[in-house]
Each structure stands twice: as structure tokens, then as C-alpha cells.
């Protein structure tokens, strides 16, 4: 950021600047403009108030300047040309369309090492759609412990409390940068948590804190974790994610993975609230098995499907899950080295 030394003439001018994320501050008798270093979204309000006037251009720059925690950068070598074989302009319920959708499910399960007996389906509404479908379909049978330490986790808390209005909910929360005390969780209850809190960068250390002999179910929003960090499937009953996240796919579709215990809950319990069609995973007390072999609830974008398949193929070719996790760790290392040697920045996660 560069701050310009300049006099202040008019309040109108100040307002004009403010609308453009620029503000005027006074220090040591001078007035300066300062600019948002990070756009003020998702609670990431940071003023980088500095009086540096010279910023050296870095000698080495990223090959791909796109940086985001979702939608994420496309894979190296990605091109629209790779989507030329997309199954477009025809019904996704035709034989070949269904085959592409089933391939998505099969490849996802294989790449993530999803155990036998678990099912995996494509859901409408990205990760939000998949996780809401899970909460609306599974919760209410037991008391709930729900964990939150940033905005997405807090969003799930708010839905459980205000929309589902569950009777017995314990909120286990922590401020930005911190994890709540995981030892407080009672696994005789259902447990909802976000594996990696995108907006604070704080993730669970592992799945060891989850009881192997739990009575309740664990519901995990893993959209910023899966593919990049290990998942202990024995500790997970329902896990969701979206294609736009760590795999750099397109938005619109989410995926849900259910353990045998979650399936058992689905078929033995009917929630007391009405379920919109796009959340429905059962019909007449039985699992809608079609969802887990590519018969999506509603119409998917086959272009987005092809794009996700492209990333799955790329992941297989670079060495599978361990290579993906290795890339995430190597990138984190580069960032941490830069943080350590840069006085102006620090990790929010403590
Ligand atoms: C942890 C977490 N949960 C949920 C979401 C919502 O994902 P989507 O927009 O794919 O529904 C996000 C998106 O950034 C996220 O980071």
C-alpha cells in the first residue's frame, strides 16, 4: 500500500473517497489517505495504516496471480478446451449423462478413500445446499453440541437455533483466531462443526478428539478441508463440500458423504419440520439411492460436472490424495516463511 501526503479540502471529497474504500486520517499534523488493504467482507476488516512511500516491486511473482479461499484458483494447466467433451444440450438423465455423474461420485470416493458402506451424492446449492440438507434431514433426533469459531460455523449455529429451533443445543464457540475447547464436546449428543474455518484460517488439528464409540452423529462442513487435509472417516458420519473450493471447480454443486450410521438415522427418523424437495434424501422411509449413483435431485450443470471431472483426473495424475495434501502443506509453508520474515503481517490463527 502507498499512502499519499495531501491536504484535505472538502468533506464531500472525503465521502467520495470513503465510498472507494479510501479514508483520510490525520497524523503528526498532516493529513494522509489510507486504503483498505483487504476489502471489508466476511469480518476481515483490516486497516493497513502505514506511512511507507516506496514499495519495491518483487523480483519473483506468482505464475498465477489468482488468490482466493473460494472460489479457488484453477488447477495448473487448466483450459476451457479441456471441457470440450462436456455432455451438453441433452438430458443429464440420459445414459451417458448419468454415467458422467456416476463417474464424479466414483472418482471422488476413490480419491478421498471413502470406506465401503458410505454413500456419496451430488447435491444442489453447493456446500451450503449439501450441509443444510444434512442438518435438516439428520438433526432433531438427539441433543446437539455445535462448534463455531468463525463466520461459517456461526452461520450453522444461527440456522440450528433460529430455523430448526432445536430444544437442547449447546454452543461451543471461540473468537476469531482460536479453537474452542474440543474436550468440552459430549459425544452422546449429535455434533456439528466446520473442519477448517475459512474466514479465520483455524482448523481442527485432527479427528482424535472425536469418540470412536459415540452415540450421536458427527456432521462436518469440510469444504475448506477435504482433499487438502486428512479425514478420519471412522470419526465422520456426514461430510459435505463444494467443487468451487479446494479443487478449484465451479460453484453450484455440493457433495454429501454419509456413513452407515447416518443412513440408519435417515431411514429411522423423520424430522418434525417440512423438508424442501432439494433437501430430501429419503422417500417413504427409505434412502433415495439414486442420488448416490448420479440421479441428481434436480438438473445439474454438466459443464460444471465436466470441470470437476477434469480436476479429479488432474489430481489422479499428480499422485492422488497425498500429492494434493503435499501441495497444500507446501503452499502453507511458503506463506508461513513469508509471514515470519514480514513485520507487517501475522497469522490470525494462534
Ligand atoms: C467453511 C465454509 N462453509 C460453507 C461455505 C459456503 O460454501 P458454498 O458457497 O460453496 O455453498 C464456505 C464458502 O466459502 C466455507 O468456507
Image (cartoon, helix red, strand yellow):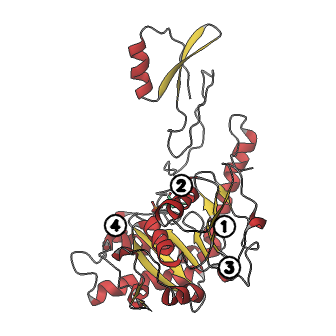
345 or 273: nearer the viewer: 273
Q: CA distance from mark 3 to mark 4?
A: 40 Å
Residue pointed to by mark 4: 81
Q: Is residue 49 left or right of residue 9?
A: right
Q: Position of residue 61 (x, y in %)?
A: 56, 44
58 or 249: nearer the viewer: 249
Q: CA distance from mark 3 to mark 2?
A: 26 Å
For label 3, count other residues whose C-alpha is less than 10 Å away and answer few (under 14), some (14-19) or many (20+). many
Mark 4 vs mark 1: give the one in front. Answer: 1
At mark 3, the secondary structure is helix
20 or 217: nearer the viewer: 217
Residue pointed to by mark 3: 235
Q: Position of residue 139 (x, y in %)?
A: 54, 75
Does residue 102 sit above or below 314 in this rendering? below
The image quadrant that residue 84 belongs to is: bottom left
Q: CA distance from mark 1 to mark 2?
A: 17 Å
Q: Is residue 311 visible?
A: no
Q: Disc 3 or 4, which lies upstream in sequence? A: 4
Q: Disc 3 or 2, which lies upstream in sequence? A: 2
Residue pointed to by mark 2: 69
Residue pointed to by mark 1: 326
Q: Position of residue 129 (x, y in %)?
A: 43, 68
Q: CA distance from mark 4 to mark 1?
A: 27 Å
246 or 125: nearer the viewer: 125
Mark 1 vs mark 2: give the one in front. Answer: 2
Amino acid at each position: 500500500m502507498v499512502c499519499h501526503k495531501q491536504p484535505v479540502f472538502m468533506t464531500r471529497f472525503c465521502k467520495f473517497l470513503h465510498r472507494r474504500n479510501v479514508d483520510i486520517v490525520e497524523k503528526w499534523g498532516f493529513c494522509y489517505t489510507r486504503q483498505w488493504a483487504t476489502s471489508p467482507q466476511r469480518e476481515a476488516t483490516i486497516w493497513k495504516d502505514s506511512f511507507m512511500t516506496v514499495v519495491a516491486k518483487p523480483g519473483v511473482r506468482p505464475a498465477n496471480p489468482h488468490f482466493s479461499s473460494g472460489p479457488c484458483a484453477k488447477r495448473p494447466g487448466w483450459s476451457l478446451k479441456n471441457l470440450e467433451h462436456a455432455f451438453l444440450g441433452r438430458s443429464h438423465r440420459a445414459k451417458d449423462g448419468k454415467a458422467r455423474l456416476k463417474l464424479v461420485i466414483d472418482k471422488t470416493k476413490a480419491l478421498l478413500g471413502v470406506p465401503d458402506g458410505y454413500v456419496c451424492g451430488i447435491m444442489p446449492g453447493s456446500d451450503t445446499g449439501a450441509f443444510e440438507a444434512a442438518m435438516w434431514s439428520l438433526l432433531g433426533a438427539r441433543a446437539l453440541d455445535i462448534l463455531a469459531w468463525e463466520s461459517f460455523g456461526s452461520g450453522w449455529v444461527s440456522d440450528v437455533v433460529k430455523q430448526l429451533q432445536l430444544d437442547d443445543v449447546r454452543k461451543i464457540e471461540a473468537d476469531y483466531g482460536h479453537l474452542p475447547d474440543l474436550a468440552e464436546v459430549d459425544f452422546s449428543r449429535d455434533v456439528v462443526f466446520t473442519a477448517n474455518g475459512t474466514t479465520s484460517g483455524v482448523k481442527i488439528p485432527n479427528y482424535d478428539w472425536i469418540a470412536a464409540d459415540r452415540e450421536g452423529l458427527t456432521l462436518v462442513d469440510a469444504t475448506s478441508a477435504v482433499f487438502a487435509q486428512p479425514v478420519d472417516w471412522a470419526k465422520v458420519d456426514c461430510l459435505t463440500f463444494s467443487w468451487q473450493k479446494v479443487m478449484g471447480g465451479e460453484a453450484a454443486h455440493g457433495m454429501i458423504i454419509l456413513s452407515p450410521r447416518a443412513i440408519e438415522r435417515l431411514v429411522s427418523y423423520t424430522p418434525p419440520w417440512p423438508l424442501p424437495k432439494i433437501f430430501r434424501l429419503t422417500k417413504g422411509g427409505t434412502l433415495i439411492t439414486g442420488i448416490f449413483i448420479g440421479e441428481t435431485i434436480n438438473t445439474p450443470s454438466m459443464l460444471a460436472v465436466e470441470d470437476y471431472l477434469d480436476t479429479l483426473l488432474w489430481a489422479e495424475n499428480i499422485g492422488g490424495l497425498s500429492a494434493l495434501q503435499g501441495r497444500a502443506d507446501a503452499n502453507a509453508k511458503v506463506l508461513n516463511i513469508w509471514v515470519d520474515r514480514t513485520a507487517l503481517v501475522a497469522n490470525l490463527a494462534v
